Amino acid sequence: MIRGLIAVALASLTAACATEQQNASLECGAVGVGLGFLACKLAGGNDATCAAVGAGVGLGGGALCYKLSDNLDKQRKELAGHENDLDARLRYMKAVNTASAKYNDDLQKQVVTITQHTDIVVQQIHDKTIDQKALDKERAKLDQAVKDADQSVAAQEEAVNYMHGLQAQHAFKEHEYTQELQHQQQLLAQTRVTAQAVAAQRQRV
């Protein structure tokens, strides 16, 4: 009976993390935390142990659900062939900014989850209750989180450069275009700061 419930929980986790790319990393990661904790409790684990397991599942799952670089690449491809269309360029810039803003919100929330989980790992290291194999896995998860954040920074940098190129090539200086470009530059700055926060957690372990 217990094994059956665990299987259902894990199957639900897999389904949750296989949703469309626009799903936020935190949304999928949060499902992972809850189901990981549930599966652990059903197996007879105590609250402290299951909290660590749940956080671990959430951290691993969140990285699989959403990549900003994929979204921005999609927006770029949709603009291809329509670069001379003022409305198409504006739609592209707005879509990029919307995706970037959503990603930044999710990443900032994910940093909280990562920090909480890293607190647990650091305590386990201090108490010598985590073996080397498990520690290596935790480090690998954090390495992936850092890599994903860095890729998002690079994707936004590329988007900013592309926007600048469009502006120079087509010589448009409409106020709305300028606003969108400035907004993306602000979002990029935010992503850089949050990516550094992710990297700081990796340095702790």
Image: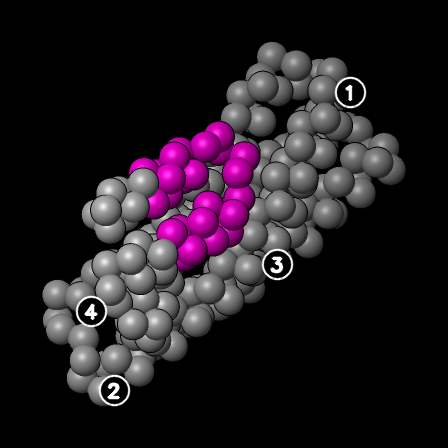
Callout 1 amino acid: Asp
Marks 4/1: CA–CA distance: 51 Å
What's the magenta bit mostly, secondary-structure-wise? helix
User: Which circle marks residue 135 in the picture?
Assistant: 4
The x, y position of residue 154, in whole percent, is 48, 46
Say left or right for 24 vs 101: left
The x, y position of residue 75, in whole percent, is 58, 27
Callout 2 amino acid: His
User: Where is mark 1, residue-wise?
Assistant: 87
User: Where is mark 2, residue-wise?
Assistant: 126
Identify which residue is drawn at 23% across, 87% down: 127
Q: Is residue 107 magenta?
A: no
36 or 98: nearer the viewer: 36
In the image, residue 28 above or below residue 52? above
Marks 2/3: CA–CA distance: 33 Å
User: Which circle marks residue 112 in the picture?
Assistant: none
The earlier-in-sequence mark between 1 and 2 is: 1
The earlier-in-sequence mark between 3 and 1 is: 1
The x, y position of residue 60, in whole percent, is 33, 53
Query: Which residue range is magenta in the image?
Result: 9-35
Mark 2, Cα crowd under 10 Å, few <14 / some 14-19 / many 20+, is few
Q: Secondary structure at mark 3?
A: helix
161 or 37: nearer the viewer: 37
Marks 3/1: CA–CA distance: 27 Å
**In the rendered image, is residue 201 in sight?**
yes
